[in-house]
Image (cartoon, grey):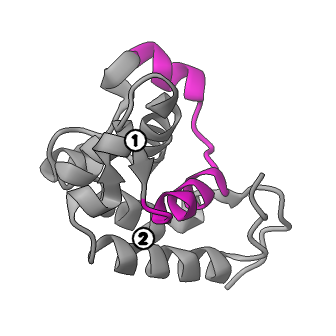
Amino acid sequence: MFKAFSNQGEWLALFASTIGTLRTLTPSEFYDEANDRYHVVRDDILQLVYGLENPADFGKFLDVNAGRESWLPENAEALASMDVTEIHYRVASNLADERWVDGALNEAFENGTLVPALERIAANIGKFKLTGSSQQAL
């Protein structure tokens, strides 16, 4: 289990560090396909995504977006028309589907949607509550 964030500033600090690391990695550094192993930054992505409580209905999201349709899109331009709560659920779906599809999160990294998706979430952090915290202001 991940440590809960005490405030949005703490979440944003981990976000900045995570994005900084992601921008330096090549696809093969992010995900070693031969060994089915991610760079340790994946743990930070997990903490960022699961550290937020999404106000949207996940069941309704899955009713419309089953299987791989629930993942991040194949190009970053498609993110522009999506609500940030949908983007959050899509990143969470990529992460969760690692149980069945090796490299599910890597697809979003390779096609260039992971970083912009995380940036949209950070830019709209006010739409979410921090899980397991008292939701203190910056």
Q: Residues within 10 Å of mark 1 (few under 14, many from 20)?
A: few
Q: Is residue 112 left or right of residue 108?
A: left
Quarter of the rendering occupied by the C terminus: bottom right
Q: Is residue 37 above or below residue 138?
A: above
Secondary structure beneath dot 2 equals helix
Q: Looking at numbered disc 2 in the image, what kind of residue is underneath it?
A: Ala
Q: Looking at numbered disc 1 in the image, what kind of residue is underneath it?
A: Asp
| Image disc number at residue 123 | 2
Q: Residues within 10 Å of mark 2 (few under 14, many from 20)?
A: few
Q: Position of residue 92 (x, y in %)?
A: 50, 41
* 20 vs 123, nearest the viewer: 20
- Is residue 45 part of the magenta span, yes or no? yes
- The reply to whether callout 2 and callout 1 are in contact (CB within 8 Å) is no
**Of circles 2 and 1, which is in front?**
1
Q: Is residue 54 above or below residue 122?
A: above
Q: Position of residue 130 (x, y in %)?
A: 71, 61
* 42 vs 83, nearest the viewer: 42
Q: Position of residue 79 (x, y in %)?
A: 25, 48
| Image disc number at residue 44 | none
- Measuring 40% from the left and 41% from the top, which residue is drawn there? 36
Give, as a single range, the part of the protein colored magenta: 39-66
Q: CA distance from mark 2 to mark 1?
A: 31 Å
Secondary structure beneath dot 1 equals loop
**Any part of residue 115 in sight:** yes
| Image disc number at residue 36 | 1
Q: Is residue 130 above or below residue 22?
A: above
Q: Position of residue 48 (x, y in %)?
A: 57, 61
* 65 vs 124, nearest the viewer: 65
- Is residue 11 part of the magenta span, yes or no? no
